[in-house]
Image (cartoon, grey):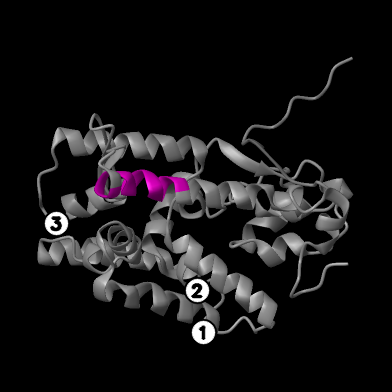
């Protein structure tokens, strides 16, 4: 039986360890593979991706750019070239389909740190800690744009843990190691999932794209729910679960919350197979 500090025991028993960790392992493989593709150029001279998560080229041909950084560039009063605009539109279109905050769960290297801190908090059975407003990330977005406008530079990107860590992993961390260490300590000792779940403006920006995304987690098997609460224990944004799982206010089984990261952990952890990936659209009734 699952416990608060060890959720998923029943899923491992009923489905097997591999199935109970399927999406988690696929996410880790994706994150590590992406990093390896960026590293293949500097380390082996095989340039799959040139650049970093802020701006890059795929096979030295397809431009890719972070749309949040592009908007900060515009706020700073700089002119954006057609190549950068095309790269930002490609990334935005991708996450409009796959789920905005899928970036956080499947791509962002900081996720590895915050997930480990959250796992350790569970094992140590630490209290929630400092309760921050989840809307704080949107204030952080406003601050990023404001500082860009006032300074005429990408001020936020000088300290953005996502781009700093990714650049550091490719080109060497130097003193930048202090940033991921600070985030890990903050999430472990101060506030549960405090950075990604409450403060990170990059995640907040991608959640705005997530409001319209097509790929969604669905709770079509919600009638089978045993109320074990394991999905809430592992979800980085547990507030998105209840409307779909409990049908609050007549809500359908699709998790439509903008901050769902499409990480798939609720699918892994559920022994009753309540959750699955699907589209945001209602399923058609069967006809006979």
Distance in Å between CA atoms under marks 3 and 2? 28 Å
In the rendering, at what x and y percent does residue 131 appear?
Answer: 55, 80
Q: Picture coordinates of residue 255 (x, y %)? A: 65, 47
Q: Left or right: where does residue 266 sit relative to residue 98?
A: right
Q: Is residue 23 visible?
A: yes
Q: Quadrant of the C terminus?
A: top right
> Looking at the rendered structure, which numbered label has been put on residue 285?
none
Please tell me which residue lies in front, 30 or 211. 30
As for residue 38 lying within the magenta part, the answer is yes
| Secondary structure of the residue carrying numbered label 2 | helix
- Secondary structure type for disc 1: helix
**Mark seen at residue 76:** 3
Q: In this view, does 66 lie above or below 183?
A: above
User: Which residue lies under the disc numbered 1?
Assistant: 190
Q: Tag 1 or tag 3, which sits nearer the N-term?
A: 3
Residue at the limit of the structure toward the top, as seen here: 288
Badge 1 vs badge 2, beta-carbon distance below 8 Å: yes
Residue 160: say if magenta.
no
The Cα–Cα distance between marks 3 and 1, rounded to whole angstroms, is: 33 Å
- SS type, badge 3: loop
- Write down the quadrant of residue 278 in the picture: top right
Q: In the image, which residues are magenta?
A: 33-43
* Prevailing SS of the magenta stretch: helix
Name the residue at 14% across, 56% down.
76
Res 131 seen here:
no
Of the two numbered discs 3 and 2 on the same chain, state the one appearing first in sequence. 3
Packing grade of label 2 (10 A; few <14, some 14-19, many >=20) is many
234 and 208: which is toward the camera = 234
- Residue named by callout 2: 194
């Amino acid at each position: 039986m699952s416990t608060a500090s060890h959720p998923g025991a029943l899923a491992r028993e009923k489905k097997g360890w591999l199935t109970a960790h399927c999406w988690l392992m696929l996410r880790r493989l994706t994150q590590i593979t992406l990093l390896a593709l960026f590293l293949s150029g500097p380390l082996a001279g095989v340039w799959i991706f040139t650049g970093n998560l802020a701006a890059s080229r795929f096979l030295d041909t397809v431009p890719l750019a972070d749309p949040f950084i592009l908007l900060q560039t515009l706020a700073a009063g700089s002119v954006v070239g057609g190549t950068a605009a095309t790269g930002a539109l490609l990334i935005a279109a991708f996450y409009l389909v796959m789920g905005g905050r899928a970036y956080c769960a499947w791509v962002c290297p900081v996720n590895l740190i915050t997930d480990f801190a959250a796992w350790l908090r569970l094992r140590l059975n630490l209290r929630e800690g400092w309760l921050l407003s989840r809307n704080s990330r949107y204030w952080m977005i406003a601050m990023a744009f404001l500082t860009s406008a006032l300074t005429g530079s990408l001020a936020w990107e000088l300290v953005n843990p996502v781009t700093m860590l990714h650049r550091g992993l490719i080109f060497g961390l130097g003193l930048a190691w202090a940033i991921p260490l600070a985030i890990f300590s903050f999430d472990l000792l101060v506030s549960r999932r405090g950075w990604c779940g409450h403060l990170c403006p990059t995640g907040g920006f991608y959640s705005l794209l997530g409001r319209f995304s097509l790929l969604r987690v669905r709770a079509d098997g919600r009638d089978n729910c045993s109320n074990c609460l394991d999905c809430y224990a592992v979800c980085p944004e547990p507030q998105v679960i209840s409307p779909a799982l409990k049908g609050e206010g007549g809500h359908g089984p699709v998790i439509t919350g903008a901050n769902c990261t499409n990480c798939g952990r609720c699918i892994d952890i559920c022994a009753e197979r309540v959750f699955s990936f699907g589209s945001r659209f209602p399923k058609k009734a069967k006809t006979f």
